[in-house]
């Protein structure tokens, strides 16, 4: 009996180490971190230049002039996602034009020159919120433009300038925009494409390490460490983030990026499948451990040195595989061990082919050169109309228009509350509404929760800084800039942290601009709560929008078509249908992702919708492989026992589809596993039969893919739940195989 393995002691990781690891996973290559540094540098330059301008021309705006210039830098960089220089320049031009038009309107209104004009500005917030939210029908570009409009309006409302001051603020905005453009569009920026390639190489190194540890565990007869598999799972999320940045930088090479990602995804899945092919509790004779370990070591060496061609190593690999093939049919081994080794044979063949393809891709230029006609960027997403067909075929209001009307109703409510109750700074409740209104009830709820808690934390930290630093305005300004930089890096994946950072920057900014004290800072909390509560109620009551109405039905239709195609293959008799046409439908679904709105700016939904599309692509890839194997099995024929194995695995897969479509319970697919195991034992009992022996590797291959296809189905089931917002971490956890102590 083996002694129990010692429980590893996990040492606490320092905060700096955790931050570094988080950035490595969520910002590979430092793309967004560089944007944050560019924002910080721009802040420093525009504040110094703005102060010098105000002092030199005696404008009397030593604080407000540089603050508006800083607002311009924030708009030009924070609401302009990392992409190529050309794309970012075009986005900057659109944001600049929209902001200048609004500031010109602010100059014409002149709220600081009379109570009537002040009332006009408050009332203008209602159509402003409608306009900012209805821009979401133009995709993410419209979403970012709307957010920029809200930020500029916020600063304009806080400053409350006279007409001449508003004109000078327009000049300050132009000054800040020019500085931000010069800093951000400079050549000192990391390559997102290079970061994506480096991330795939990190996964390649991790897979080689995985195989090394698997080889050692098999050779020594020890338990395989689960921590190694966890590292592969962590790298999976990193590749998603790197792929998004690389595609934004070079949209024309998206197909090449996706092809490389799929290769490494298959590599990761293949080694995890191989780990599941280690016989459990099998005797050591005949010797299957050393050929298994030798084959795994060979694949690891190839991954570590893809540019090295070693003929002798290839010969040793072939001998190890041949020996493993002999052992797989040895009657001394239990049936389960023999079948596990048969699956290992197909896994090693699959890994060898994958490594060959990866080596060819790494030795060639990447992305590969394309003709000019092929390098044209994809067409912009179709604008969502104001009215769309409903479930019953009748026209109904589109989601962006519903959300815009919600924003108008909510801002009208906060404005009316301001006129009736006369809050100290009622504009903050109105601005909170404009920031937290999401594209669905669930997203609005998440924003409300994070914005409220974040403001509470930010105000608390701000009060502490105010009491500790006193009147050191420039030091407070530095913390304010730092908070904005933190918000920029964390806004996609940690909206809670971003909300706290924004809350801190706002209260510090208000103190710098208007001398806001602790009492006013505390007022930001209940004003935020008022605005957030009104936004949530309106989102739930007035024309509610649910994400299920936008994406989930279409995903379920695709899954239904996948099930229909799968059920038509052998051993089913009749007309066959293929999954190949579904690939284009998945791509079209991915092309419409930006139309979902604000997910990639504030919440988690956009990243998880991208995960759904990616998982659908992987699912269809596995189904295509199973389609090929089923055709080969149909051509090879076989006994009834072989057909029974395939039928049992086929039934389990169909049950997996029923689970994800909500037609069966969560554990139904797992409950079908014993039937598969029983059919496998029956077939292995006939392994000496020549006809059975010839098709056993195909059967093993079919079963391997049958096991693998359950993972994307589990992930899709989690991602399609209606009762939780989509979170990448939850989807990965749902798809992960339950931990088990594997014995070599």
Image (cartoon, helix red, strand yellow):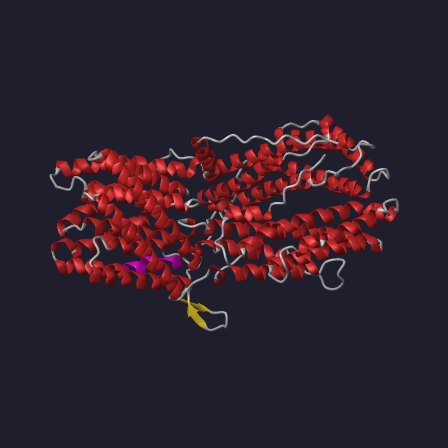
Q: Which of the two residues, 469 or 97, is positioned nearer the viewer here?
A: 469
Horizontal side, residue 189 vs residue 305: left or right: left
Q: Position of residue 735 (x, y in %)?
A: 59, 48
Magenta span of residues: 127-139
User: How many numbered badges does the structure rendering display?
Assistant: 0
Horizontal side, residue 315 vs residue 426: left or right: right
Q: Position of residue 577 (x, y in %)?
A: 68, 60
Q: Position of residue 125 (x, y in %)?
A: 25, 58
Q: Quick check: 51 above or below 258?
A: above
The question of residue 130 being in magenta is answered with yes
**Can residue 179 be seen in the rendering of this structure?**
no
Q: Quadrant of residue 460?
A: top left
Q: Quick check: 68 above or below 718?
A: above
Q: Quadrant of residue 229?
A: top right
Residue at horizontal 47%, vertical 42%? 246
Q: Main secondary structure of the magenta part?
A: helix
The question of residue 555 being in magenta is answered with no
**Can residue 657 be seen in the rendering of this structure?**
yes
Horizontal side, residue 547 vs residue 499: left or right: right
* Image quarter of the C terminus: top right
Residue at horizontal 65%, vertical 51%? 710
Outermost residue on the right side: it is: 689
Q: Which of the two residues, 277 or 250, is positioned nearer the viewer here?
A: 277
Residue at horizontal 43%, vertical 70%? 396
Q: Which of the two residues, 733 or 39, is positioned nearer the viewer here?
A: 733
* Image quarter of the N terminus: top right
Q: Position of residue 667 (x, y in %)?
A: 65, 55
């Amino acid at each position: 009996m083996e002694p129990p393995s010692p429980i590893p002691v996990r040492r606490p990781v320092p905060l700096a180490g955790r931050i570094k690891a988080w950035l490595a996973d969520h910002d590979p290559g430092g793309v967004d971190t560089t944007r944050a540094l560019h924002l910080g540098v721009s802040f420093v330059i525009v504040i110094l230049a703005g102060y010098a301008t105000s002092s030199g021309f005696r404008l009397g705006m030593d604080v407000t002039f540089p603050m508006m210039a800083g607002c311009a830098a924030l708009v030009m960089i924070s609401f302009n996602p990392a992409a190529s220089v050309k794309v970012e320049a075009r986005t900057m031009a659109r944001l600049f034009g929209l902001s200048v038009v609004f500031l010109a309107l602010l100059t014409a209104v002149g709220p600081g020159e009379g109570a009537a004009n002040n009332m006009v500005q408050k009332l203008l917030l209602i159509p402003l919120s409608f306009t900012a939210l209805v821009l979401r029908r133009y995709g993410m570009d419209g979403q970012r433009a709307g957010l920029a409009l809200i930020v500029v309006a916020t600063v304009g409302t806080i400053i409350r300038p006279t007409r001449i001051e508003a004109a000078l603020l327009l000049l300050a905005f132009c000054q800040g925009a020019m500085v931000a453009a010069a800093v951000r569009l400079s050549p000192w920026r990391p390559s997102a494409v290079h970061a994506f390639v480096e991330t795939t190489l990190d996964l390649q190194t991790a897979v080689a390490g995985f195989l090394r540890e698997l080889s050692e565990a098999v050779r020594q007869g020890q338990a395989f460490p689960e921590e190694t598999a966890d590292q592969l799972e962590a790298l999976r999320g990193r590749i998603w983030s790197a792929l998004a940045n690389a595609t934004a930088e070079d949209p024309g090479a998206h197909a090449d990026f996706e092809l490389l990602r799929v290769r490494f995804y298959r590599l990761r899945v293949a080694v995890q499948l191989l780990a599941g092919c280690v016989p459990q509790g099998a005797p050591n004779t005949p010797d299957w451990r050393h050929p298994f370990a030798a084959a795994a070591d060979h694949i690891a060496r190839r991954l570590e040195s893809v540019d090295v061609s070693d003929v002798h190593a290839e010969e040793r690999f072939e001998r190890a595989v041949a020996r493993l093939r002999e052992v797989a049919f040895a009657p001394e081994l239990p049936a389960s061990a023999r079948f596990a080794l048969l699956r290992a044979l197909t896994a090693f063949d699959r890994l060898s082919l994958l490594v060959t393809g990866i080596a060819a891709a790494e030795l060639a230029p990447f992305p590969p050169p394309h003709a000019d006609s092929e390098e044209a960027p994809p067409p912009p997403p179709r604008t969502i109309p104001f009215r769309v067909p409903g479930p019953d075929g009748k026209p109904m209001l589109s989601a962006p228009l519903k959300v815009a009307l919600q924003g108008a109703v909510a801002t009208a409510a906060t404005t009316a509350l301001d006129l009736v109750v006369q809050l100290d700074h009622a504009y903050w409740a109105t601005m909170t509404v404009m920031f937290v209104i999401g594209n669905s009830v669930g997203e609005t709820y998440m924003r409300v929760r994070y914005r409220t808690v974040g403001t509470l934390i930010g105000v608390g930290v701000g009060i502490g800084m105010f009491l500790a630093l006193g009147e050191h305005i420039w030091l407070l300004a530095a913390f304010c800039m730092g908070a904005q930089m933190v918000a920029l890096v964390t806004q996609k994946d940690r909206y809670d942290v971003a909300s706290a950072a924004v809350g801190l920057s706002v209260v510090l900014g208000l103190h710098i601009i208007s001398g806001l004290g602790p009492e006013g800072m505390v007022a930001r909390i209940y004003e935020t709560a008022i605005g957030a509560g009104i936004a949530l109620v309106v989102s739930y009551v007035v024309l509610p929008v649910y994400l299920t109405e936008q994406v989930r039905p279409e995903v379920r239709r695709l899954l239904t078509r996948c099930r229909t195609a799968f059920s038509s293959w052998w051993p089913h008799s009749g007309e066959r249908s293929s999954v190949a046409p579904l690939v284009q439908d998945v791509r079209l679904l991915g092309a419409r992702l930006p139309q979902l709105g604000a997910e990639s700016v504030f919440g988690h939904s956009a990243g998880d919708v991208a995960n759904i599309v990616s998982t659908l692509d992987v699912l269809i890839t596995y189904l295509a492989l199973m389609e090929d194997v089923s055709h080969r099995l149909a051509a090879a024929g076989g006994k009834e026992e072989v057909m029974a194995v395939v039928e049992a695995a086929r039934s389990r897969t169909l049950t997996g589809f029923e689970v994800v479509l909500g037609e069966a319970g969560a554990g139904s697919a797992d409950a079908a596993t014993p039937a598969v195991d029983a059919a496998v034992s029956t077939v292995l009992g006939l392994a000496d039969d020549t006809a059975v022996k010839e098709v056993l590797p195909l059967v093993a291959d079919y079963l391997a893919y049958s096991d693998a296809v359950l993972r994307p189905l589990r992930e899709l089931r989690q991602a399609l739940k209606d009762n939780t917002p989509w979170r990448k971490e939850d989807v990965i956890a749902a798809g992960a195989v339950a931990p088990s102590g594997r014995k070599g």
